[in-house]
Image (cartoon, rainbow, N blue to C red):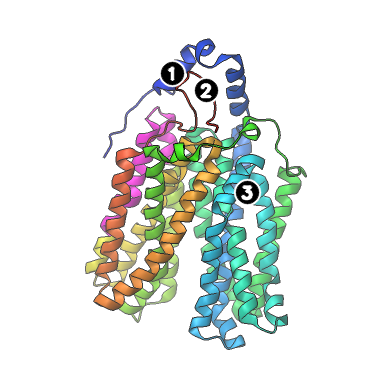
């Protein structure tokens, strides 16, 4: 693994030469563009407010997303769905989720990630709140629910690419790890909230209440964001370098080894995470049939939240102390994919329930370190198109994640052993980690320095 190297903030040779010879390499116009780009960064107090707001938004995103799985059993009984029909409704979300990743990031890079987040939240929040109405008043509830879940996937698919775009445009490099890891922990918080409070509402007031409350709260969040943070802004971009970009040379970007590395690594990370998320409850039920479900469904997520926050604080602290940014990203990814794989393999020989819960909690906790690794590295490489590039990464990860979930089920049936699945997860983790450690960088690759000018790639 790469050794952390300490350096000054301007250790990159290209940027250092630019700074030493501004007149020759950048010119007055280039200096003004660079100043305009940096002047758009949030101040620390503003960044803290946005961190809390985005954390709450991601929490509500997962509350709305998980509402259907929470209510699926009750809805299946109410509308007489079979297992296959229930699976069709639940699975339709992920197919929609794959198709708007790149578009969401592309639009966010141009009009601003905060605006895309606000509009999409209002849309998927309203869709969530109207779900019970669609189910009751449609003559074919299975059709209306499948279409609504597909649309939910389309609308929620823009969330994380928009976050990546917003963070790359507004947050300085030394603070991106904490913001992304904190906001990322909202997914675990939302899963816990809807799993606890949502289940209670389901028992007391019926499945409709889960959709009504989570949907209306999401719409309220979007309105407050527009009213108090965006100050009623429309869909236009204020002054800044991002609005003046023409089409980028994507083929040129994809030829960069560092860009290929983040795509492959994120693909492996997403695949293994989706597999664990989908199959761990079944693993516990098969291996420890008398175990209480709330224990293995709650404890790992409680561990994941502080682990995600710690990884962000650690990475930002190391960078602020002068350690090489690329080495810090690699260190975080080593914990996420390397150390977590050790605990995944330990599950193969687990014989007691407390030990299994401990190993799973360690695995899920360490996996969150990727929020400060590959997930934020895309913002280091291409801040001018971070949203669209993250969309490409997330699309690849979503497709391969679905395939991995199905293939893991085949392995379990064919071998009758969970060791084959955990072994496959480990192999994918090591493949992604090896690629990231070998080729990952933190220098910008969306700028062209070959002609001695500091500008964005155009075609």
Q: Secondary structure at mark 1?
A: helix
Q: Nearer the viewer, residue 255 or 365?
A: 255
Between disc 1 and disc 3, whose residue precedes? 1
The residue under the point 43% across, 18% down is 16
Which SS does the magenta portion mostly show? helix
The residue under the point 52% across, 58% down is 187
Q: State yes or no: discs 1 and 2 in contact (Cβ < 8 Å).
A: no
Query: Which disc number belongs to residue 53?
Result: 3
Residue 352 locus on image (x, y percent)? 26, 72
How much space separates mark 1 and mark 3, taking CA atoms? Answer: 36 Å
Residue behind mark 2: 454
- Residue 11 seen from this side: no
Residue 73 found in image quarter: bottom right
Q: Is residue 354 left or right of residue 190?
A: left
Q: Inspect the magenta stretch and tell me whether residue 211 lies in it.
A: no
Q: Is residue 237 left or right of residue 297?
A: right
Residue 327 locus on image (x, y percent)? 34, 35
How much space separates mark 1 and mark 2, taking CA atoms? Answer: 12 Å
- Residue 136 seen from this side: yes
Between disc 2 and disc 3, whose residue precedes? 3
Q: Which residues are magenta?
A: 314-343
| In the image, residue 214 above or below residue 162 | below
């Amino acid at each position: 693994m790469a050794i952390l190297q300490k350096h000054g903030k301007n250790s990159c040779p290209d940027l250092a030469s630019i700074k030493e010879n501004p007149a020759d390499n950048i010119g007055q116009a280039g200096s003004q563009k660079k100043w305009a780009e940096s002047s758009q960064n949030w101040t620390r107090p503003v960044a803290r407010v946005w961190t809390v707001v985005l954390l709450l938004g991601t929490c509500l995103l997962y509350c709305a997303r998980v509402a259907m799985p929470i209510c699926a059993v009750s809805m299946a009984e109410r509308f007489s769905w079979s297992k296959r029909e229930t699976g069709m409704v639940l699975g339709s979300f992920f197919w929609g989720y794959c198709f708007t990743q790149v578009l969401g990031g592309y639009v966010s890079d141009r009009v601003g990630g905060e605006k895309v987040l606000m509009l999409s939240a209002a849309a998927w929040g309203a869709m969530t709140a109207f779900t019970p109405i669609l189910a009751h008043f449609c003559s074919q509830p299975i059709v209306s629910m499948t279409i609504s879940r597909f649309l939910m996937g389309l609308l929620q698919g823009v969330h994380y690419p928009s976050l990546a775009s917003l963070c790359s445009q507004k947050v300085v490099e030394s603070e991106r790890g904490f913001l992304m890891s904190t906001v990322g922990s909202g997914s675990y918080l939302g899963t816990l909230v809807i799993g606890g409070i949502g289940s209670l509402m389901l028992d007391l007031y019926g499945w409709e209440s889960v959709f009504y409350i989570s949907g209306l709260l999401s719409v309220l969040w979007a309105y407050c964001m527009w009213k108090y943070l965006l100050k009623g802004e429309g869909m236009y971009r204020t002054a800044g370098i991002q609005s003046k970009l023409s089409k980028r040379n994507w083929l040129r970007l994809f030829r960069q080894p560092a860009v290929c590395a983040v795509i492959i690594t994120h693909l492996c990370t997403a695949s293994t995470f989706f597999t664990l998320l989908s199959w761990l409850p079944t693993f516990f039920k098969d291996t420890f049939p008398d175990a209480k479900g709330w224990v293995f469904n709650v404890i790992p997520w409680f561990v994941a939240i502080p682990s995600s926050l710690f990884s962000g604080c650690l990475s930002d602290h190391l960078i602020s102390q002068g350690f090489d940014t690329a080495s810090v990203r690699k260190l975080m990814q080593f914990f996420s994919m390397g150390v977590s794989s050790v605990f995944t393999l330990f599950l193969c020989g687990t014989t007691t329930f407390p030990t299994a819960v401990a190993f799973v909690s360690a695995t899920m906790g360490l996996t969150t370190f990727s929020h400060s690794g590959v997930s934020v590295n895309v913002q280091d490489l291409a801040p001018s198109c971070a949203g669209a590039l993250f969309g490409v990464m997330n699309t690849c990860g979503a497709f391969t994640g679905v395939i991995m979930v199905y293939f893991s089920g085949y392995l379990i049936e064919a071998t009758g052993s969970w060791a084959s699945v955990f072994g496959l997860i480990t192999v994918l983790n090591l493949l992604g980690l090896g690629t990231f450690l070998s080729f990952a960088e933190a220098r910008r690759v969306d700028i062209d320095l070959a002609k001695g000018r500091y500008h964005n790639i155009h075609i």
